Every structure is written in structure tokens, then in C-alpha cells.
Image (cartoon, grey):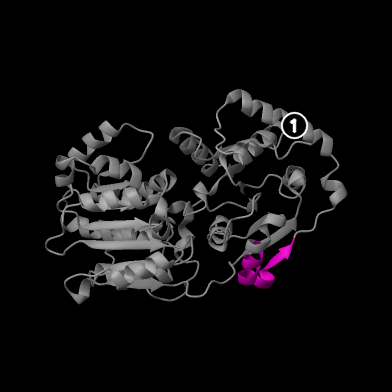
Amino acid sequence: MADSNSSSSSSDSCDENNSPITFQELGVENWLIKICNSVNIFHPTRIQQLCLPLIIKENRNVIGSSDTGTGKTICYCFSILQDLNKNMYSIFALILLPTTELVFQVVDIFQLYGIKIGVKILSCIGGFSLIEQRKQIYYKPHIVIGTPGRVSNILNNCEDIKICFKRLKYLVLDEADLLLQKYFETNLKIVLNNLPEDKNNERKTLFFSSTINESLHLLKKTFCFNNDVKKLVLINVNKKRKPLKNLDQRFIYLETIVQLNYLIYILENKLSNLSGIIFAANSYKCELICNVLQMSGIGSVVSIHTAKNQQKRISSLLRFKNGLCKILVATDLISRGIDIPKVAFVINFDFPNNTIQYIHRVGRTARANRKGLAISFVDKKDKQVFNDVKKIMKEKLKPYVIDKQDALKNLFKIGKIIKMAELKLEEQKEIKQDGEMLRQRVFRM
């Protein structure tokens, strides 16, 4: 989720709402509204209209769900900062997110809206000194924002650190549907088990997500407190999934062996000079595509995947966000929540594993009332998931027509480039291929 309402995406906050409801009516104070107006945010979105009063006025625990790009981050950002301004103590809020990239994005949002009250924020992520981050906890920042893995490392078996959280007023799980999956289970348990008990029942626990899954439904049923007021309230703006507005969705059936030929043809002839994201299934393929595009002279290209260290990932994302490069090749590491409003297109080089993943990926474009294009490469192995996506998107998902002869006119030239790129990756030994499938050179001619 982590969909920002910063100045770079100001219209995200009003793209779905034309009602006269104001932030003031929802309980938001004037100093926050002035900052909103300064970044061209004037009206709350539907999710903000429903969640902000529950958190600010009624002190409820909330599960909030709405489409990506609708300003869910504002729901907890405003609530926390407004509450903190009344009583500036530490540590006031802990916010958990699934990826480093989302952590940095949410930190930026809190810095934007919290600058006038002097908010102190600590980001806790891997790739940086654990000892140094523990030291920073002792300096008692107001808000800690991090990934479950690093926060669990900081908290685990450290009583002095745990005490720093004894007055914690807010606990937020952003992209909650993902955080509640098995992958994060161990670290999340460590975090929750090491937080001091909320003896006075004053802590607010908030969950936000673009999608509601079984874990969140179960959470609502089992989440209980000593009084009815603090029970968990589910706000689901997405009760029925609708095809995304302003998004032209296309697909093309391709054999794996010619995918790179078609990709290069499309980028050179159909999407020239436009900014976009190409999604690949794994780190090796990500880096291979990136190298092939660079060797083919397709402008400036960067990649993001888990095999890259944190600093390189952050650098690549910033270069793409700031327009220093046009094309980002990535795994699903950035398919959720990352807010880059001027993405003109998304290409699913590898088709997503499920419909939710598809929605998150294509949601990286057509943001903030801009038009966007999503092109998906489909082969035989994708048949089941592709049919599931078609059922949801219906007539919105249309064939992408390309002249085969034109697309394959440089077949042998690109084949040589692919081989060179593969050899380069072998020499660099930067990508660890864990499993025989990844070791196969699927694009060798």
C-alpha cells in the first residue's frame, strides 16, 4: 500500500472523490491541512473519509483497504502526527512494512507532514549497522519505521530496547496482507512478543492493504479487547474489484525464446522515450534483461531485485523516480505500494503468479489520473492465471497486435547480444542462481 500523498503524487488524494467533504470535517487539524494544500491536496479520498474519523475521533483499531494510489498512508500518518503533537514523547509509533523501498517512501511522507512539529524518525532496515540502529533507539525517536526482519533483530533478547517501547501509542502494519503471510511470520511474532503489554488498553493498532485476504478476515474475527470501542473495524472500499481506470491493458501470446526480441522492438518502436517498469520473475532474469537492453542501446536502464544490496537498490529506485533513467527492470519487490506517478507503462515480461499480483503490478501505472499502458507477455504455462485475470478485467484486457516479421527482423543480432549478456553475468558472479531452472539459459538461440 504505502501509497504516498506527497507533492509528487498530490492528485492521488482526490482522484476518486468529487464530494465536498473536507479534511477539517474528518477531524484533521489546520496545520496539517495547510501542508496538504501546499502540495495540492485539497479533498480526502474515500478511504480517508472513512478511516480518519474512526482513528482520530473514535480511537478505533482499523483495517483499511482500498486501491493502490488512494492515499492510505495519510490515514495513519495524519492520525499519528496529530496525536503526537499533543504529547511529544518517544517511542510513540512503530510502523512495519515489507520492503526497504516502502520504508524509505513512508519516511519521506512523515518528514513532509511532520517537519513543523519537529518529528524525529528512525528507519530500521537491513544493509545498515544493527548496532548503530540499536543506539538510535536509545535516543528515543518519536516514530520507528522498519521491516519486520530488522525490527525483530533490534528487539529480540534486548530488555533495554524493549523498555523504550513501553509507551507505544500506535502500531501500524502497512501492506498487511503481505506481512501476515508465512514468510514474515517468525519475525512478526518476535516483534509482537517483545512489545511491552498495553496495560491501559490505549494503543491503536492499524492495518492497511490494497487487498483483503483470509488472514485479514480471520484477524478481524479474533482481534479483541476488553471493550467494544477498541474492537477492530474493517473498512473495505474495494468490495468488488473493478478494472483500473485510465489503464489500457493488453496481452500478447509469445514463445519464451522470442520474448526479448519483442521487448526490444516494443521499447524502440512503440514506447520510445517513455518511462516504464518491466517485471521479471527472478533476480537472474531481471539482470539479464537489464544487460540486454543496455547492450542494445535502449536508453538508460536500471534494475531492482533481492540479489542487489540495499544501497544499490535504493540508488536505482531514486534514479528512476527522479527521471535520471527511463526504464526500471524489477521483480515483485516494487510491485506493491511504491509511488512513482509518471510511469507511462508496465510490461509483464513474466506473467504474474496470481490475479492479486497482476493488479499490484499494473497499478504502478495510470496513477494520479494519468493514462497508462500495461502489456503482458503470455505463454502456455500462464494459461490458468491469465484466464483468472481475464475474468476480472473482462473486455478491458485486449490483444496487443504487433507485426511478427517486424518484431523478429533482428532475431540473430539480438541472439548474439543475449549470449554476451549471459557471459557477462557469469563473469560477474553477482547473481546466485538457486535451482536448476534459473541456471538454464532460456533465451539461448
Figure quadrant of residue 286: top right
Q: Position of residue 69 (x, y in %)?
A: 48, 60
- SS of the residue at dot 1? helix
Residue 367 relative to residue 346: left or right? left
Q: Amino acid at mark 1?
A: Ile
Q: Position of residue 159 (x, y in %)?
A: 15, 42
- Residue 181 versus residue 309: which sits nearer the camera? 181
| Residue at point 32%, 51% (across, down) | 188
- Residue 152 versus residue 402: which sits nearer the camera? 152
Q: How many marks?
A: 1
| Residue at point 44%, 66% (across, down) | 213
Q: Position of residue 49 (x, y in %)?
A: 37, 72
**Residue 426 covered by magenta stretch:** no
Quadrant into which the N terminus falls? bottom left
Q: Position of residue 104 (x, y in %)?
A: 39, 44
What is the magenta segment's predominant secondary structure? helix
Residue 380 relative to residue 177: left or right? right
Q: Eyeballing the image, is 309 above or below 337?
A: above
Give the magenta-colored segment's residue range.
386-399
How crowded pointer 1 is (Cα within 10 Å; few <14, some 14-19, many 20+) is rated as: some
- Residue 86 versus residue 228: which sits nearer the camera? 228
Residue closest to the far top = 427
Figure quadrant of residue 86: bottom left
Which residue is the site of mark 1? Answer: 417
Residue closest to the far front = 436
**Residue 397 covered by magenta stretch:** yes
Residue 53 shows in this picture: no
- Residue 296 versus residue 52: which sits nearer the camera? 296
Residue 399 relative to residue 189: left or right? right
Q: Eyeballing the image, is 84 above or below 53?
A: above
Residue 307 shows in this picture: yes
Quadrant into which the C terminus falls? top right
